[in-house]
Image (cartoon, rainbow, N blue to C red):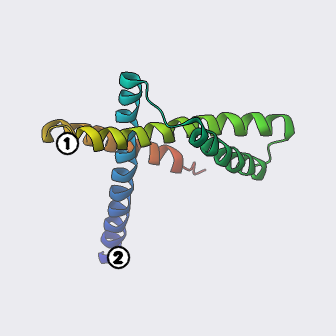
């Protein structure tokens, strides 16, 4: 009976840490979106283009490895890199917003981080779900 409980505890801790990590990124992403809409402030175009280039190469290689053929390879890589670039800019803006304006009050912070952690756990489960036949 002991090895079953150890496996459950190990999986619980792994999922808890991963959920809080993804949840904190979702929290920063939300704050970054808020800061972008409030101030219309983004990083310089050189940084955005560098991020887009790195993500374009990564996503294209990833899609190529998955067997995507040429016309869809570059379009899919560009679309995925656009999404990743936007998310990265939002997270960085969230960090900068918190650095300039501090964290929200503790009650609000705990509520927001809890909701973000739940969303992070659901995302992790959606991406790691495997059908068993």
- Side of 71 where 115 appears, left or right: left
Rendering coords of residue 84 (x, y %): 57, 40
Quarter of the image where the N terminus is located: bottom left
| Residue at 29% across, 44% down | 99
Q: Nearer the viewer, mark 1 or mark 2?
A: 1
Rendering coords of residue 76 (x, y %): 72, 36
Q: Front-most of 92 and 60?
A: 92
Rendering coords of residue 35 (x, y %): 36, 29
- Side of 96 where 51 appears, left or right: right
Classify mark 1: residues with Cα within 10 Å, few (<14), some (14-19) or many (20+): few
Q: Quadrant of residue 51?
A: top right
Judged from this view, the residue extending furthest toward the right is 70
| Residue at 79% across, 40% down | 73
Q: Is label 2 in a helix, a strand or a loop?
A: helix
- Which disc is residue 18 wearing? none
Q: Are marks 1 and 2 in contact (CB under 8 Å)?
A: no
Q: Front-most of 42 and 64?
A: 42
* Residue corresponding to mark 2: 3
* Residue corresponding to mark 1: 110
Classify mark 2: residues with Cα within 10 Å, few (<14), some (14-19) or many (20+): few
| Residue at 19% across, 42% down | 110
């Amino acid at each position: 009976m002991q090895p079953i409980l150890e496996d459950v505890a190990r999986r619980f801790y792994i999922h808890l840490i991963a959920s809080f990590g993804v949840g904190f990124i979702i929290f920063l992403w939300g704050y970054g979106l808020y800061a972008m809409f409030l101030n219309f402030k983004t990083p310089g175009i050189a940084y955005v283009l560098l991020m887009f280039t790195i993500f374009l190469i990564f996503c294209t290689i990833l899609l190529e490895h998955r067997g995507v053929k040429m016309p869809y390879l570059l379009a899919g890589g560009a679309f995925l890199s656009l999404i990743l670039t936007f998310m990265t800019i939002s997270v960085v803006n969230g960090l900068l917003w918190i650095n300039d304006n501090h964290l929200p009050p503790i009650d609000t912070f705990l509520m927001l981080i809890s909701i973000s952690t739940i969303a992070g756990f659901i995302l992790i489960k959606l991406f790691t779900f495997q059908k068993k036949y």
